[in-house]
Image: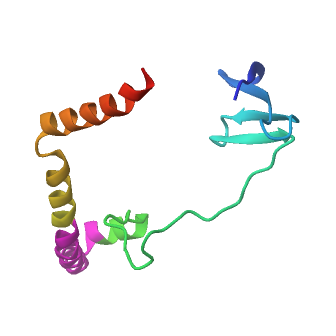
Amino acid sequence: YNAEKKQAGSYFSTKIWSFRMKCHLCSKWMEIHTDPKNHDFVFVDGVRRKAEPPETPDDEVEPAVVPLSDDQREKIATNPFYKLEHTTQDKRTAEKAVPRLRQLQDISSRFYKDQDTVNRILRDSFRETKRPLI
């Protein structure tokens, strides 16, 4: 998009920017403002937010690291049995994650083991597609 960028105001010392642009499909104008207070954008005119839930590739995949609440931190600091129990759960979670991490390392090593060869193959394919254009 070729947007017109203007300063629409300020939030403390941070500038609020206004972006005004034409839609490439219908030639109508849309305007979006930055919102530094909420770390977001405000859709002012000609556009609306598309509300979609974030994509999750696997619903059964648990997050590897779950942040602790203040209550849990306090219990860990004061209760040795809770700390021991929590440490045991952390070890089990880490053991469950090991196969997936190994799988990711194997995939990464297969693709990036020899950077020079990968680069050469990519450049050769690029030259082959470029040759007919010349």
Q: Is residue 99 above or below residue 9?
A: below
114 up-or-down from 66: above or below: above
Q: Is residue 15 left or right of residue 79?
A: right
Task: Name the dominant secondary structure of the magenta segment.
Answer: helix
Determine the residue positioned at 29% across, 36% down.
125
Front-most of 59 and 125? 125
Q: Is residue 74 left or right of residue 36?
A: left
The answer to whether residue 134 is magenta is no
Which quarter of the picture shows residue 15? top right
Position of the C terminus, as image quadrant, is top left
Q: Nearer the viewer, residue 23 or 134?
A: 134
Rendering coords of residue 42 (x, y %): 76, 41
- Seen from the viewer's position, the closer of residues 15 and 111 is 111
| Residue at x 21% of width, y 34% of height | 119
Q: Which residues are magenta?
A: 76-100
Total labels: the figure holds: 0
Q: Residue furthest left?
A: 114
Q: Is residue 92 above or below residue 29?
A: below
Front one among 63 and 26: 26
Up/down of 110 relative to 14, above or below: below
Residue 71 percent location from the top left of the image: 41, 69
Residue 19: image location, x then y, percent: 75, 27
The image quadrant that residue 22 belongs to is top right
Q: Is residue 1 left or right of residue 129?
A: right
Residue 78, magenta (yes or no): yes
Residue 1 percent coordinates (x, y): 69, 29
Q: How is the image coloured?
A: rainbow
At horizontal 17% and vertical 72% (from top left) the residue drawn is 99
